[in-house]
């Protein structure tokens, strides 16, 4: 193995693993705790046992790089209107039957990882294209933790922010190392029953709730939540009531929640797309239960995607898809009408990236 350059070796050394009594090695990155014989890969596909250690096989590799609006992650309270350099690798540590990025997250084809970039090159690309942030997205950065952390460290040295788009299925110690360097995160809270997580995601709910509480109470990482509502699976009033009540009670009312529309994909093509009314109903339940900032997503709903002052209800950030309109904040991030602070991280003026999606080449 080598640690010189991602182009020199397929295998990158990792830290979070330990041998077990039967001769296998257990990966300790996520609660799945894959136990591997020599040459085997975990469910994520990218962490592999080689020479009696567990290595990362996708360090420095990507399926491509693209500049997105930060609102697409979705993050509505983190430098609104700004461009973010987005990329992912391959694989995932969940097995969601409804995956909307299955061509990347479920891929076991290393050939699709045709793009390469060191952490320094990622940082320089962000600066060159005037991106305030880099997002680890498309597939879950937890599984390429070492690459994400090294990139975040390089970014921080040059004043570039980092964003993790993740399901939050990660063990305690790697979570401490990972979120230490993340400026913002959007975590998919996929449902609010263990039955849903087990049957449709191959995971469990409790570790995700632990991750959310850790982020809010133990880090400086700005957090927003996204729930993809699937008809007949996780969209009942009762489940949304319990979820939003838990968020307010355990994370606080200031955590933004995004309710987004499911589209038939991967292994759930027999279920219809989520009606817009379902998203509005979930948003209303969240607001009724004390969530200050609740949004609809994946549908055209300017009212449901705009930000309002939780004190006086004035429009603070108007959105039409990913394009910003009226800006009701003063230069200190407060409502101009009543001077109530808006939770989040803001520049004195909004960005103007709009809804553009711009693929770029690195190297």
Image (cartoon, grey):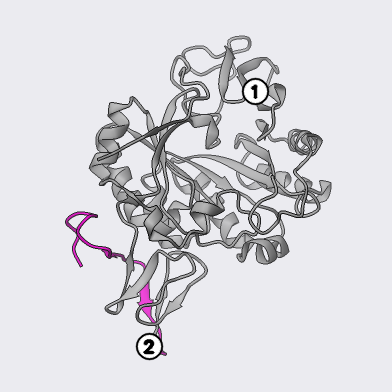
Q: Position of residue 176 (x, y in %)?
A: 40, 55
Q: Quadrant of the C terminus?
A: top left
Name the residue nearer the viewer: 289 or 143: 143
Provide residue 138's location: percent of width, then percent of height. 49, 46
> On the image, which quarter does residue 341 sit in?
top right
Q: Is residue 98 above or below residue 313?
A: below
Residue furthest to the top: 337
Residue 23 is marked as 2
- Of pointers 2 and 1, the one earlier in the residue sequence: 2
Q: Which residue is mark 1?
A: 306
Is residue 153 placed above or below 32 in the rendered structure?
A: above
Q: Is residue 341 visible?
A: no
The extreme front residue here reads 111
Label 2: how many residues lie within 10 Å, few (<14), some (14-19) or many (20+)? few
SS assignment at label 2:
loop
The one of 175 and 350 positioned closer to us in this rendering: 350
Residue 132 location (% of width, % of height):
37, 28
Q: What's the magenta region? A: 1-22
Q: Does residue 306 show up? A: yes
Give the label on residue 59, or none: none
Residue shown at the point (47%, 13%) measured from the top left: 331
Q: Is residue 20 magenta?
A: yes
Q: Residue at x 29, y 40 (%)?
A: 122
Residue 261 in percent (x, y) is at 70, 41
- For the stretch drawn in magenta, the main secondary structure is loop
Q: Residues within 10 Å of mark 1 (few under 14, many from 20)?
A: many
């Amino acid at each position: 193995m080598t640690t010189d350059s991602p182009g020199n070796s397929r295998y990158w050394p990792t830290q979070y693993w330990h041998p077990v009594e039967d001769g296998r090695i257990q990966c300790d990155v996520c609660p799945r705790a894959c136990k591997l014989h020599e040459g085997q890969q975990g469910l994520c596909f990218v962490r592999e046992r080689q020479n009696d250690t567990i290595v990362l096989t996708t360090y420095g590799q990507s399926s491509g790089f693209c500049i997105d609006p930060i609102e697409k992650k979705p993050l509505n309270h983190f430098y609104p209107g700004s461009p973010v350099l987005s990329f992912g690798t391959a694989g995932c540590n969940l097995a969601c039957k409804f995956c909307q990025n299955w061509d990347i997250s479920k891929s076991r084809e290393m050939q699709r990882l045709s793009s390469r970039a060191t952490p320094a090159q990622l940082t320089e690309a962000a600066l060159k294209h005037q991106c305030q942030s880099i997002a680890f997205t498309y597939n879950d950065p937890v599984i390429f933790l070492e690459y994400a952390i090294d990139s975040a460290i390089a970014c921080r040295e040059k004043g570039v922010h980092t964003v993790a788009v993740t399901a939050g299925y990660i063990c305690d110690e790697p979570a401490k190392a990972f979120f230490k360097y993340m400026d913002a995160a959007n975590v998919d809270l996929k449902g609010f029953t263990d039955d849903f997580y087990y049957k449709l995601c191959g995971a469990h709910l409790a570790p995700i709730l632990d991750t959310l509480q850790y982020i809010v109470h133990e880090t400086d990482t700005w957090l927003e939540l996204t729930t993809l509502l699937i008809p007949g699976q996780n969209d009942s009033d009762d489940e949304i009531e319990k979820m939003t009540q838990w968020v307010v009670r355990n994370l606080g009312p200031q955590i933004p929640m995004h309710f987004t529309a499911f589209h038939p994909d991967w292994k759930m093509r027999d279920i219809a797309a989520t009606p817009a009314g379902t998203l509005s109903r979930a948003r209303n339940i969240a607001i009724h239960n004390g969530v200050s900032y609740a949004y609809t997503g994946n549908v055209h709903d300017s009212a449901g995607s705009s930000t309002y002052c939780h004190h006086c209800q004035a429009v603070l950030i108007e959105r039409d898809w990913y394009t910003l309109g009226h800006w009701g904040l003063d230069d200190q991030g407060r409502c101009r009408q009543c001077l109530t602070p808006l939770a989040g991280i803001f520049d004195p003026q909004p960005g103007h990236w709009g809804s553009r999606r711009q693929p770029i080449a690195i190297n």
